[in-house]
Amino acid sequence: MLKPVITLLCILMGTISVNMVGQNNLPIYLDESKPIEQRVEDALSRMTLEEKVAMCHAQSKFSSAGVPRLGIPENWATDGPHGIRPEVLWDEWDQAGWTNDSCIAFPALTCLAATWDKDLSALYGKSIGEEARYRNKNILLGPGVNIYRTPLNGRNFEYMGEDPFLASKMVVPYIQGVQANGVAACVKHYALNNQEIDRHTVNVNVDDRTLYEIYLPAFKAAVQEGKAWAIMGAYNRYKGEWACHNQYLLNDILRGEWGFDGVVVSDWGGVNNTKQAIYNGLDMEFGSWTDGLSEGASNAYDNYYLANPFLKLLYSGEVKVEEVDKKVRNILRLAFRTTMNTKRPWGSFGTPEHAAAGRKIAEGGIVLLKNNNNVLPIDLNKTKKILVVGENAIKPMTVGGGSSSLKAKYEIAPLDGIMKRMGTQAEITYARGYVGDPTSEYNGVKLKRDLHDSRSAAELIGEATKLAKDADVVIFIGGLNKSDGQDSEGNDRKALNLSYGQDNVIAELAKANKNLIVVNISGNAIAMPWINDVPAIVQSWYNGTESGTALASILAGDANPSGKLPFTFPVKLDDNGAHKLGDYPGLNKEATYHESIFVGYRWIDKEKIKPLFPFGHGLSYTTFEYGKASADNKEMTADGKISFYVSVKNTGNREGAEVVQLYISDLKSSLPRPVKELKGFEKVNLKPGEEKTVTFTIDKTALSFFDDKKHDWVAESGDFEALIGVSATDIKSKIGFKLK
Ligand code: GLC
């Protein structure tokens, strides 16, 4: 009954001319039975020039204008990739101090990548999408998929590792899960944002082959398979043009080659020029006039590059209206997919289900790097005295690190988790061991625990080693943290080694007790000078709300570790191409990627370097046996496929999951190629004694390289090898085949 009345009123008010009313009396742009492009055109035709321009730039720190007159809501963006940022005031970075916006903090995306589990990626996207939806945000500023080029990059913890295939496969379900909630995923930072040093100014020089083979695939998968509704331009320059308005990246590749129909959002403060922002593919400008990221003038938003300066050019006719129409079409499409979609679910926030999802992802991503003499799992029937050492055992990690910082509803720190899980069966003692960064506050969100400790390093080590002498097991929990110069946005680390004298603490503990377990909490590789003195090493991540619960469950053996490294641990920095060739962090704001496609294990293989721990490595509490791999053919035609089979058997006495990896090697090629490249992976769960056959079916895309002369992917006929392995250095079988 109400609809016809409203329509009549609108017609009487002249805002809706009769011919634009659909058959059910609704104006076409409001009629959800109409094709979205028709609705876009109808809405566009009703908008004034001022309304169009207003949509193309921020009106507050995280929002941009809708069209109130037409009932089109504002767009509200929110960080970040690991959880929903606390509400901020209109024009502030600091949190607004709401009492109902404490979120579930999910594990960092390096942990998700380390699960190698697409189902967990879907669970992740669904969960974080529900939280964003509930908080009424229609653009989630994540996931991040920049490739891990150097272990010093402060933001690697937000991304999915060194391999484009792994990142491509793991980012898609996350995006689909988020968008099923009617919230746009905004994949970032497109492109080549592989360091934080000089991030606002550096100009990246990289050849097309490397761009297409290494740095674009995860973004391409996000757009073409994930169907991302938004993408964020990076701060840096590429080919001398800012990535936020870059003809090649945005118009030629993203729109032209990939057919992207979503919105291009700038990074906050990433826009530097009105004309380029108009013509080079940007749709929505955020965070400008805030000298990067700190403060803004009260009328800053009118002065944005795509605000009054844009309007003036349109009024004068120097810029045609079709330029603003292109942007507004993309923004209206975003609206119809999100805020204007009346069938969206309602979301949920801070729920036990989301906490459980985070825990499951953490347990699936924690990596058992080393486990001599089965020190792990801790046998609580025999182990009566456990000493826990290290600041990261008590230091919450959901606060800090930059824009991904959160106000978590709660966070179980490692010591809390260990106390809860093991405290009734063993005596748990804690010693600080070292003092790293006792502060932890970001945008007004403060740590609940006071970590200050004025004792000297000698006192702290003395206390820890004394207690270690009569413990059955010692668990050192250290690593990096979210402070500036560690794993944090805006800066990079200066060295591969741990800070705060941790290496010395570990060395002293190893002398005091041979049953030493080192848990490294980080989003980056670290050097391990003490590795030969430590029997058990666990790589844990920034795992959010249930960090401690998940870690304790792995250490106690409730959960069997199944994570695999998404990036290489080099022994030293020089074992990394960017560092060996002296390209990082660049000279005079010019960063040239001379290592080209040889990133990560591709470099390790090329230079025949032995890594500390290889890409794809991860142990289990059970053992697996692999049958000889076979293939359904000895050769493959250019438009055909070939399948490989390998059986995996759980030969241990407990259930576990294994990640079988398929690498492809091109034995002879007209251009230099990596020794091998990941082209398939399957995580299989096996009960004791159970055996399964894993099948990989590939087509020529798995054999192709990007020929930048032809500007196309090429699969050259000849001999290839399929390598089936459980890490980049642990290859179980090889099968030769031909591409005809
Ligand atoms: C930051 C980050 C970006 C974030 C945005 C909003 O500078 O680069 O990832 O989403 O600004 O906080």
Image (cartoon, rainbow, N blue to C red):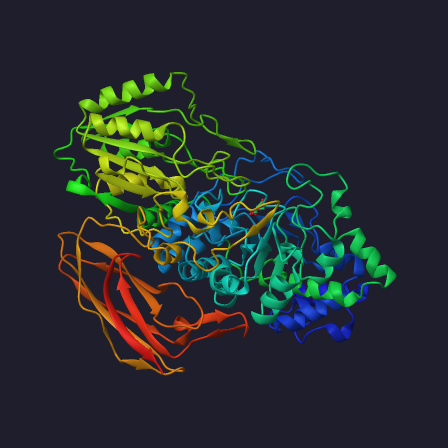
* Res. 330 in view: yes
Q: Quadrant of the N terminus?
A: bottom right
Where residue 547 sits: x, y (%)? 36, 40
The front one of 151 and 437 is: 151
Q: Left or right: where does residue 6 sit relative to residue 177? A: right
Where residue 78 sits: x, y (%)? 57, 47
Q: Quadrant of the C terminus?
A: bottom left
Q: Is residue 86 above or below residue 238?
A: above
The front one of 575 and 313 is: 575
Where residue 79 sits: x, y (%)? 54, 46
Residue found farthest to the right = 316
The front one of 708 and 163 is: 708
The front one of 447 and 238 is: 238
Q: Residue at x 16, y 52 (%)?
A: 654
Where residue 127 sits: x, y (%)? 43, 52
* Quadrant position of residue 332: bottom right
Count of picture labels: 0
* Res. 261 in view: no
Q: Is residue 184 above or below residue 528?
A: below
Q: Left or right: where does residue 523 sit relative to residue 94? A: left
